[in-house]
Structure formats: C-alpha cells, structure tokens
C-alpha cells in the first residue's frame, strides 16, 4: 500500500507536469504556425534519440505488455523522460498524437523502479506494472475508476486480476488527486439529454456500436499499414519521422488549417454541440496513424476520442438520437474497439457523461469491441474471453469452408 501510494503521488505529479507543458507547447504552436515547417527536423531529432539511446524503450506501451506477460528486467527509467520529450516535440511542431501513451509509460517506468530495491517475485512485479498504468491513465484523463479497470483489463483482455483491484484503485485515485492538487484541470463534456430506453433506441445504439467497431478496425489496420510501410521502405529509423514530417507539414499547408493535428480537443468539444464535416473522423485517422506509424511519439487515445466523437456527430444523419449522445457513445466506443477494453471504456463514459447515458454507452462499447477485428492497437496484447471465442469460431468456419 505504501508503494502504491508513492507511485500515485509520483505518477500524478509527472502527469501534471506533462499536461501543463503540453498545453503550453500547443498554445505556442497555434500562435506560431511556422513551427510546423520544422516538423521534419523534429522527427529526425526524435528518431535519432530513440535509435541511438532509446532502442530498448522504443516499443512503448508494448514493452509494458511484454514485461507483464514475461517479466525479465526492470523497465528502464529513461523511458519516462524520453517519451515525455518526444511527445512534447511531436505536438510543438504539428504531429497528430495523443497523451495516454506518454502518461502510462512514464507512470509504469516510475512504478517499476521499485522492483530494483525490493526484488519482488514475478507476481508482485506484475502488480507494479498494473498500478503504474492505472495511475498514469487516471491522472491524465481525470477518470480514476476507468484508469483502474483499464490497467487490469488491457493487459490480458477477457481476464480480470481480482487481487489487483484495490491497489489499482488506490494508485488511480491518489494519482488523480495529486494531478488536480497541482492545479491541473481536465476537459469536461456533457450530454444534456438522453432519450428513453426502448427497443428502437437500443437497436440504434447497437447499430452505431457496429459502425464504431468497424471504424476502430480501420484505425488499427491503418496504424499497422503505415508502420510496416515506413519500416520496409526506409531502413534507417531516424529518417522515417523525418520523411513523415515532410508529408504532414505539406498536408497542413495545403489544407490551410490545423484541424487534424495535435490533440484536437476543440474539435471534440464542438462534436457535442455543433455539426462537423462528415469526413473529419477519416482525416484524423489518416493524420494520426501516419504520425505514429512514421515514428513520432505520443498516444493514440485522445485522437481516438476525436475520431469517435466526430463519427458520432456524423451519425446523427442516420440515427435520430441526440447529437451529444452519439458523440459521447463514439468517444468511448471507438477507444474500446481499438484497445479491447469495453468495461473500462463503459466506466469512463459514465464518469465523463453521467450514469443516465449508461444504457447507450455500455452496449456501444461492447459491440464495438466485438466488431473491431481480432486484435487492437497494442500488438503485444493477449486477447481472451468472448472475443477470442468469437474469432476462433470464425477462423474454424473459414478453414472448414476452404477445405470443402
């Protein structure tokens, strides 16, 4: 419990520093748009740093999964400062990335340092990684309940590690409280009205969940496509973000706006109250997967919020549900599909939008997760539970049909 509390304090402080600097750097970029022209050089800097000094931490979140599933050595502490600086540079010069990956990696790197001093057994070592992920996620989004469940659910989808619930909750709430104590505020979203529960409305929620899941699948496929394309065409790693930065800078110049770079929080807020372009979610998929695939740093989650909210905003032309409700459903459901964490995302939706929206958010998250393909954005994540059963059955049917 003492270690858990210390991790919560340290992770919350790290997230507070990160969020403060991220807002500062974003404001600096928006008031000096000429900085976007330097994105290729920023990419070269990030690529060179990770190539020569950060090769063992370049896997990012997947390193956390690997160490959880097969504990071998302590996560290097340098993961924390490297991902912090890499993400800030990405946002300062105009990349499209998020913040969840940064906060989670910083917190997990901090929490795992305790294994150097206490030499825990493999089972307790896994607990350190869980409380780190929980603290990082909770503090960066201000959602402690979702942060705790996310840390438990994401490491092995479909299996709940019950002994980790109390430590995960403790680290999440302490980290969130610490971050808030540093006078850091989180963005608030509201769903003013929720329709009555009926068969028709539930059918529309389920149908929207399918669309959110297919969109999550598109994001995952695009993410892997750009990553593999850059690796296969550009052997020298530092040149990948350099090349990607050139294309992104040119694209922003041609568009004449910064709508699809950075976190995109203003667009997310607009999705709850205004009509957006029907193609906004597709453009954000392209910019984000290209940025991450090229080797820039940052998470995918806030862009996924953007994609889901913008898509939900567009679906109002198909489903006669309130715009804010559809935006909120997409906000968490696309995230659920790409990370295979429907329970955590459903809880997050309730934390952010209120319990009244739960009858629509919960089915959207679970259906999205089922329709998002056999895997997600974390290549080292193990899939279990109902989703594994469904896709194993589909593979069996496919083999039987081919053999016949």
Image: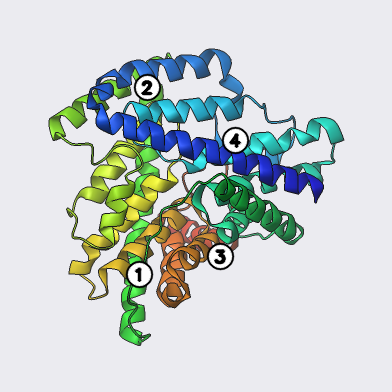
88 with respect to 111 (left or right) = left
Rendered location of residue 83, percent (x, y): 52, 29
* On-image quarter of the C terminus: bottom left
Q: Quadrant of residue 56?
A: top right
Q: Earlier in the sequence, mark 1 or mark 2?
A: 1
Name the mark nearer the viewer: 3 or 1.
Answer: 1
Q: Disc 1 on helix, strand or loop?
A: loop
Closer to the camera in the image, 91 or 185: 185
Residue annotated with mark 4: 106
Q: Earlier in the sequence, mark 4 or mark 1?
A: 4
Q: Disc 2 on helix, strand or loop?
A: helix
Q: Give the CA separation, mark 4 to mark 1.
A: 32 Å
Q: Give the CA separation, mark 3 to mark 1.
A: 30 Å
Name the mark nearer the viewer: 1 or 2.
Answer: 1
Q: Residue at x 34, y 48 (%)?
A: 265
Q: Disc 3 on helix, strand or loop?
A: helix
364 with respect to 320 (left or right) = right
Residue annotated with mark 3: 386
Q: Earlier in the sequence, mark 3 or mark 4?
A: 4
Residue annotated with mark 2: 241
363 with respect to 183 (left or right) = left
Rendered location of residue 392, percent (x, y): 53, 58
Residue annotated with mark 1: 191
Q: Is residue 371 visible?
A: no
Q: Quadrant of residue 272?
A: bottom left
Dot 2, how many residues are within 10 Å of its Cα: few (below 14), some (14-19), or many (20+)?
many
Q: Give the CA separation, mark 3 to mark 4.
A: 32 Å
Q: Earlier in the sequence, mark 3 or mark 1?
A: 1
Judge whether 170 appears above or below 343 on screen.
Answer: above
């Amino acid at each position: 419990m003492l270690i858990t509390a210390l991790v919560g304090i340290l992770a919350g402080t790290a997230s507070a520093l990160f969020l403060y600097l991220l807002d500062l750097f974003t404001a600096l970029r928006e008031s000096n748009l000429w900085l976007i022209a330097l994105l290729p050089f920023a990419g070269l800097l990030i690529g060179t740093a990770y190539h020569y000094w950060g090769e063992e931490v370049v896997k990012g979140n997947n390193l956390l999964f690997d160490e959880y599933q097969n504990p071998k050595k302590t996560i290097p502490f340098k993961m924390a400062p490297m991902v912090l600086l890499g993400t800030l540079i990405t946002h300062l010069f105009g990349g499209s990335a998020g913040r969840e990956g940064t906060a989670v990696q910083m917190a997990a790197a901090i929490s795992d340092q305790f294994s150097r001093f206490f030499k825990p057994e493999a089972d307790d070592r896994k607990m350190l990684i869980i409380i780190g992920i929980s603290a990082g996620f909770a503090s960066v989004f201000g959602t402690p309940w979702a942060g705790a469940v996310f840390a438990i659910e994401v490491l092995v989808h479909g299996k709940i590690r019950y002994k980790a619930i109390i430590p995960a909750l403790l680290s999440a709430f302490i980290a969130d409280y610490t971050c808030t104590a540093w006078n850091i505020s989180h963005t608030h979203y509201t769903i003013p009205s929720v329709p009555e529960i009926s068969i028709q409305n539930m059918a529309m929620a389920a149908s929207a969940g399918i669309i959110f899941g297919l969109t999550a699948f598109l994001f995952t496929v695009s993410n892997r496509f750009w990553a593999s394309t850059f690796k296969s065409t550009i052997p020298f790693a530092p040149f990948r973000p350099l090349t990607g930065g050139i294309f992104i800078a040119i694209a922003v110049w041609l568009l004449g706006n910064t709508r699809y770079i950075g976190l995109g929080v203003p667009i997310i807020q607009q999705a709850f109250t205004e009509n957006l372009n029907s193609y906004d979610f597709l453009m954000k998929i392209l910019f984000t997967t290209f940025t991450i695939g090229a080797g820039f740093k940052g998470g995918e989650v806030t862009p996924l919020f953007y994609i889901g909210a913008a898509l939900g905003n567009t679906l109002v032309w198909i489903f006669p549900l309130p715009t804010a409700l559809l935006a909120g459903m997409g906000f968490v459901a696309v995230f659920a599909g790409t990370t295979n964490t429907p329970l955590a995302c459903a809880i997050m939706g309730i934390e952010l939008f209120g319990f009244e929206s739960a009858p629509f958010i919960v089915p959207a998250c679970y259906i999205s997760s089922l329709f998002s393909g056999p895997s997600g954005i974390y290549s080292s994540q193990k899939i279990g539970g109902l989703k594994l059963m469904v896709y194993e059955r589909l593979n069996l049917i496919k083999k039987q049909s081919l053999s016949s």
